[in-house]
Amino acid sequence: MATVKHIPDGFHTVTPHLIVKGAGKALDFYAQAFGAKEQVRMPGPGGSIMHAQMQIGDSIIMLADENPEMGNRGPQTLGGSSVVLSIYCDDADAMFARATKAGAKVTMPLTDMFWGDRYGQVTDPFGHQWAIATHQKDVTPDEMRKAMKEQFAHQ
């Protein structure tokens, strides 16, 4: 008898599950903005999406339409999000441009950060915040503290 894996293939220990108003449009946006590959789309009542699954890079993200009766509300209904989803990629500038062209709003311009990343943030049309980064150099904690002081001394 085969042993069932406690963490299914393709998943990591923590998997985000996004709630959005307009999950079908969100799946299309994530494909255009981040190159997401849709894996599953399960329809729910009234044309809603009860469950969807997409992959960005090596990470799976689940997604569903709002269902207020079940306590599931997205950022637009709640008036914002307290979560930032981070994407590491080979070219932050290219992905940042792709996301903004697709309709994401810049909330933090791309900058070379003191911790060694080229990093910026966007908010998607559904209210979720995304950080886009490319790791450019490894820095020690001491180098990071020094670079942080230098970076913020100029602001």
Image (spheres, helix red, strand yellow):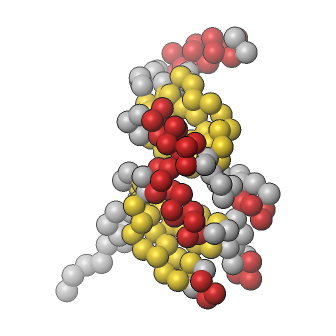
Q: Is residue 46 left or right of residue 63?
A: right
Question: What residue do we see at 54% from left, 57% from top?
Answer: 29
Can you name the residue that lies furthest to the left here?
A: 1
Residue nearest the observer in this picture, 21 or 82: 21
Query: Is residue 112 shown above or below 99?
Result: above
Tell me, yes or no, if residue 50 can be seen here: yes
Displayed quadrant of residue 5: bottom left
Locate residue 74, reporting x and y percent.
Answer: 70, 65
Q: Quadrant of the N terminus?
A: bottom left
Locate residue 56, reporting x and y percent.
Answer: 42, 54
Q: Is residue 58 left or right of residue 112?
A: left
Question: What residue do we see at 61% from left, 47% from top?
Answer: 104
Residue nearest the observer in this picture, 107 or 11: 107
Displayed quadrant of residue 18: bottom right
Question: What residue do we see at 69% from left, 11% from top?
Answer: 154
Q: Is residue 74 left or right of residue 52?
A: right
Locate residue 4, reporting x and y percent.
Answer: 30, 78
Locate residue 51, reporting x and y percent.
Answer: 52, 76
Can you name the residue that lies furthest to the right here?
A: 79
Displayed quadrant of residue 10: bottom left
